[in-house]
Amino acid sequence: MNHVRVRFAPSPTGYLHVGGARTALFNWFFARKLGGQFVLRIEDTDTQRLKEDSVSQILASMKWLGIDWDEGPEVGGPCGPYYQSQRLEMYQKEAQRLVKEGKAYYCFCAPDELAQTRELQRQTGQAFRYNGKCRGISQTDALKRIEAGEEAVVRLRVPDRGQIKVTDLIHGNVNFELDQLDDLIIVKSNGIPAYNFACVIDDHAMNISHVIRAEEHLSNTPKQVLLYQALGYNIVQFAHVPMILAPDRSKLSKRHGATSIEEFRDQGFLAPAIVNYLTFLGWSPGTDQELITPAETVEQFEISKVSKKAAIYDTKKLAWINGQYLSSMSLNDVIGETIPFLLRKGLITEMQAGEQYNSIKNIIDVVRNRVKTLVELTEATEYFFKDVTEYDEKGQRKYFSKPETTDLLRQGRDSLEQIECFDVQHTEAAYRQLIEDLSIKSGDLIHPTRLALTGRMESPGLFEVMVLLGKDRCLARMDRAINFICKTLR
RNA sequence: GGCCCUAUGGUCAAGAGGUUAAGACGCUGCCCUCUCAAGGCGGAGACAGGGGUUCAAUUCCCCUUAGGGCUACCA
């Protein structure tokens, strides 16, 4: 009924990075909106740069983000295999067909020889272009030389003159002059197809209808169009989505901090927040909506509304979105996301995670809307799980240095000790009463107490903290602080 | 170097031949307040430059500039 089929085709040379994730996401939105299929294909034809584990990492990141694929690794499908390394025969066959038809030819030029002419062309200000040296070698001669052990690549015969028009759903028509193009290599000397060739053959073989990919491929597109023509295939629809750049407008790389989805996860960002952020990087529904679910995006997504402009990723905004999710998600979900971080930081053990679930839950509930990431959240809960052994330095100067402090803390401590029912109402009432009795400002008592109880100058509401710590720990920490002040600050 | 793409505040981003040029993040002032967040109310901040076309251009065209991409036996 409809023939929309799109694909995401990462090459397994590393982790899934934000740009790739966004491209995958846009493909996925497009397919889901139009009721088409989303195919995942692994482009593992670069034997040099291949990285072990990369495929499983990429798949894991995609799953984590919630991007599922209809065909591809793990799920299979009618157009498999979905690894290019397992489709070599098909490329070989098509390459030979092109050679037979005279549309491609064997080339014996050595790489360093080519580099020399390229250098010459650079100096004379011409386009870097293969000089056509092997164009005239007959097929029989070429085959003989190959049999004799000579290494050869296969090149596509590209016309010297003419134009190629690329139609792009985002950019409109883009024209390229053929005299700028090379006789491109379609099969490398090791028999493995080059990117442009494998890509075209697979997109055709897999019945892909729309190729949605990063803009870096726009300049490759005329080459692929040439290939479509030579192979006699119908041309797909292209859509080139803008790149994602680092804050300094350069290409994203490790030196810019986190670039892979995995790193963002480790830094405490939530999958739905990342998806939300990426959705609005290069696309907008035209409203002022800032928070959106994938389901809503699927409903509203339009490829023609994708921006033409490269976007710079801004972790501040990501953090804000993440904070929004942290406070609006169900508490149980937040806990589920946080526990691994607590475990990793050694604040709790697996056993405690089960046994003390309720108290962990209450702790997370009071801190979750004051932080932006799970890492911050974890950090903010530290004093609930560990004893306070040091006090914020600035805080000491501010709240522990006055002569009357120990006395105040002692009175506070004693009033807490009196409380039978140690809940927020009673602790607060006790403190308010004491404050009134002493005719002091509430901060005069509350601030030193906070420092005593948490070691910090900021925390959730003091009485909530007290209750979560429990009476015994509160009293112990007050005593410890009083001692500390007497010993160190006097 | 050649070719291609792109150009609205610091960032994301709406917009349209005539608008006081949205909104969000960030920054910032005030309010609230036990701190920190959150929240509420304000503020600063943009159509890269130059030529056209037009009664009128930020919007359409050209050039310049800037950024990005391709120019690999990488993808």
Image: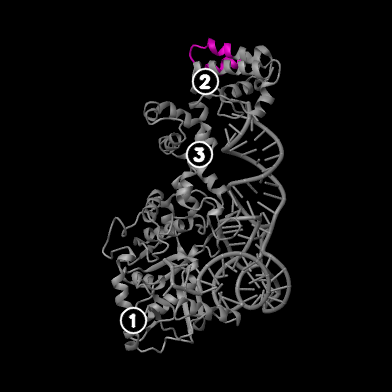
Q: Looking at the rendering, in which quadrant would you find the C terminus of chain A? A: top right
Dot 3 falls on a residue whose secondary structure is helix
Amino acid beneath label 2: Val
Q: Amino acid at mark 3?
A: Val
Which tag, 1 or 2, sits closer to the chain's start?
1
Residue A424, label in figure? 2
Seen in the picture, residue A417 relative to A66 is either above or below; the reply is above
Asked whether residue A433 appears in the rendered view, the answer is no
Q: Residues within 10 Å of mark 3 (few under 14, many from 20)?
A: some
Left or right of A70 in this view: A184 = right
Q: Report whether residue A448 is seen.
A: yes
The residue wearing badge 1 is A146
Q: Earlier in the sequence, mark 3 or mark 2?
A: 3
The residue under label 3 is A375
- C-alpha distance separating marks 1 and 2: 86 Å
Type of amino acid under label 1: Ile
